[in-house]
Amino acid sequence: MKYYLFKSEPGTWSWDDQCNAKNQTTEWDGVRNFQANNVMKAMKKGDRGFFYHSVNEKRIVGVVEVVKEWEVDPTDTTGRSKEGFGMVTLKAVGPFPTPVTLDDIKNQPKCESMVLVNNSRLSVQPVTAPEFKHICKLGGFKA
């Protein structure tokens, strides 16, 4: 299993929206960054990720699971990619009892190499297994 982080503006799509979606599942579409798109291409069914509220909150609020692997995003009309930008389908696994903020993460020596700390603008990013386990522990989430 591999791990990731999915950033979303809570005013656009929030953890509550994810949990209230049909079967708590949604297509993670609209990603228009080649690096983030390539990260999604590497995802496999069963991989897990953090659901991160960006903008003013800047905190991990839950865990999602990839239930459908990368496919072309039908909302992509940019024509900038031969293959098109893509999407994966995610399902809510559970909330963090205690959300973990970006400041909390930055203050953890075990997370100093984390993509979120060093490239916080990337909307979909990989997370190492040790980082995932450590942050789950901080948030009180049983991984």
Image: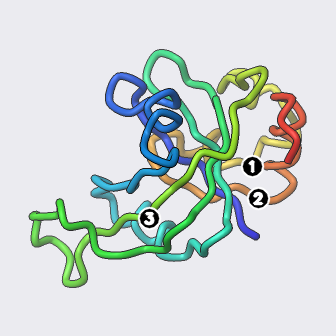
Q: Mark 1–mark 2 contact, CB under 8 Å?
A: yes
Q: Residues within 10 Å of mark 2 (few under 14, many from 20)?
A: some
Percent x, y of residue 86: 33, 69
- For the residues labelled 1 and 2, the Cα–Cα distance comes to 10 Å
Task: Left or right? Give the position of 111 relative to 84.
Answer: right
Q: Mark 2–mark 3 contact, CB under 8 Å?
A: no
Residue found at x 72% / y 67%? 2
Residue type at mark 2?
Thr
Residue under circle 3? Answer: 88
Q: Secondary structure at mark 1?
A: loop
Q: Secondary structure at mark 3?
A: strand
> Residue 113 has which mark?
1
Residue under circle 2? Answer: 128
**Up-down relation of residue 9 to residue 70 (above or below):** above
Residue found at x 69% / y 55%? 127
Describe the colour scheme in one phrase: rainbow
Residue type at mark 1?
Ser
Q: Secondary structure at mark 2?
A: loop
Residue found at x 46% / y 16%? 56
> 137 or 111, which lies in front?
137
Percent x, y of residue 50: 64, 44
Q: Residues within 10 Å of mark 1 (few under 14, many from 20)?
A: few
Percent x, y of residue 78: 11, 64
- For the residues labelled 1 and 3, the Cα–Cα distance comes to 25 Å
